[in-house]
Every structure is written in C-alpha cells, then in structure tokens.
Amino acid sequence: MKDIFVLLVIVLAMYVFMKIMLKEPILPWKEKKVSNDVRVNKDKKLKKNKKEVEESPLEEKEAAPFKELFPNVVGIESHMLRHGNNEFTMFAEVEPVNYFLRDPEEQEIVDASFETWVASINYPIRIYLQNRFVDLTEPIEEIQKTMSDVDDLNFEAREFGENLIRELKAWQTAQPRYETKRYILFDYKVDVKDLKVDDDEDLDERIVDKAFNELHRRVQAARQQLRSGEMLVHLLTTDGITEVLYYAFNRRKAMKNRYRDIERQEQLALYVTADQEPSHIALVKGEIERAQEESIS
C-alpha cells in the first residue's frame, strides 16, 4: 500500500511538472489563460500587417503632396497652371543624362552647365520628380506593327519578335516597376500695378500674356544653359500639363486607363462626336459656311 502511494505521488509530481513546462492549467477544467506577451505579439503582428498594407507601393499617395505643391489651382491657361492671385506655373521636362557612365571630363561639363544656370538665375525654381509605373505599351505596339507590315520576315525573326513581346509583358507585370519623370517648375506672380492696359484691352488677357512671356523667357534661358551638358529641356504644353496631373492623381489606374488611349478615343473632347456619313459632314460644313457668310454681311 505504501509503494502504491509513493508511485501516485511521483506520477502526480511528473504531471504537475509537465503542465508547468507546457504552460497549461494544472486542473483540466480550468481554461487556459493567454499570456499578455502572446497578446502583445499578436497585436504587434496585426499592426505590422496593417502597416504593410497601408505602405503598399500600389497605393495612390501622390495626390496629397501634389496639392501641397500646387495649392489654390484655378485651371490651365496658355500652357501654364494658373493659381489664385494671378500666380502662374510653367512646366519644363528635363531629359535625364546618365551621369555615372561618363568619364570625369564629361561629368565636369554636366556639373558646370548646371552650376552656371543656377548661378545665373535670380528667381526661385522648383524641381518636381514624378514616379510612374513603367509602361511598355507603345514599344510593344511598334514591334507588332513592324512585324505585321513586313511581308518577307522569316520564321526565326517572327518567332523572336513574338517571344520578345511575351517577355516584355511578363517583365512589366511581374512586379511594380517605376520610371522617374523630371520637371522644372517656374513660378511667377503678375503684379497688376505694373501693367499698362489700354481702354480697349482686356486686363485678364494682358495678365496671361505677361506671365507667359516672362515664364517662357526663363524656360528658354534654362534650355540654353543646360544644353551644353546634354540635358535637354522641353516646354510642356497644356496637353503635357494635363498628363502630369492625370498621372499624379491616378498613378495606379493609369496602367489600365492610359492617358494616350483617353486622348485617342477623344474622351477629352468638349463635344460628343460619332461616326457620320460623308454626305452629312458636307451638309454640316455647308451650314457652317453659310452662317459665317451671313454674320460677315
């Protein structure tokens, strides 16, 4: 009897030791308590996962900083972004130069041209970098057009072109890839007091002309100074500024709804148009000409 009691004590001690090591309740009918450390770790994992979702590169986060960069926008006029209080911004795109593939002498030329331009200006400028998803639609369309136009293309060349198109599409969709567009922003505020306006002139037109002439002069100066360093500067038209705005506020959607496709489909037109027969087009033109002659007479 004594041996059985000792054996039960040993088994009970082993059972308690095992439960303590496994961090489980000793009494089977007691619920297992979740330690605070486990809850804290779970909360950290949830917060981490939530943060990873929020910081996904596919999320559109360009709109907020763009509004801070261009506050109080009124519209686009004469290839300029117009703000309130007669302030205007002209965009110029700069083609990149591969600086690190050049030898020291060529790098010195690039540095000197940029330093000379910066030292020569007495007005503020801003540099705007816009990251876009890489879009290979146009190069792929050019390859497809070339393959369809050439009749004597041999089998190996055609197979190579088809494989190249598949590889380009797979490379573009494999993961998010970006390209950077570089812009110089020239700001100018027109002081109405400095304008001499005749009675037959429109004040608003004089303000727009004054802003355009001054900003265009600044863009031309940057183009001449940076050309020596092979940094080509291109003035953006109204269409170019609209494209920048479109990609700023629709960075992710622009992959499927491309701006150039919207332009081709005439979705930017002021009036709804449709395919018409030549006789109907001629009739409309005749009516327009007749109305113009009546207005002149």
Image: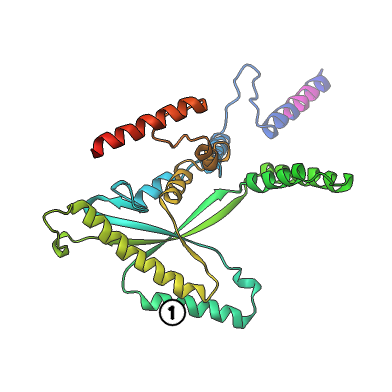
Looking at the picture, does residue 189 appear above or below residue 275?
A: below
In the image, 14 versus 54, the foreground residue is: 54
Q: Residue at x 30, y 36 (%)?
A: 292
Residue tagged 1: 116
* Residue 181 x %, y %: 52, 56
* Residue 273 x %, y %: 45, 29
Looking at the picture, does residue 21 appear above or below residue 140?
A: above
In the image, 69 versus 82, the foreground residue is: 82
- 85 vs 5, left or right, is left
- 282 vs 296, left or right, is right
Q: Residue at x 73, y 30 (%)?
A: 18
* Circle 1 SS class: helix
Looking at the picture, does residue 295 appear above or below residue 276?
A: below
* Residue 295 x %, y %: 25, 36
- 46 vs 249, left or right, is right
Residue at the far front in the pictured view: 297
**In this picture, which residue range is highlighted in magenta?**
6-13
| Type of amino acid under label 1 | Thr
Local crowd size for mark 1, using a 10 Å CA cut-off: few (<14), some (14–19), many (≥20)? few
- Tell whether position 129 is magenta: no
* Residue 221 x %, y %: 40, 72
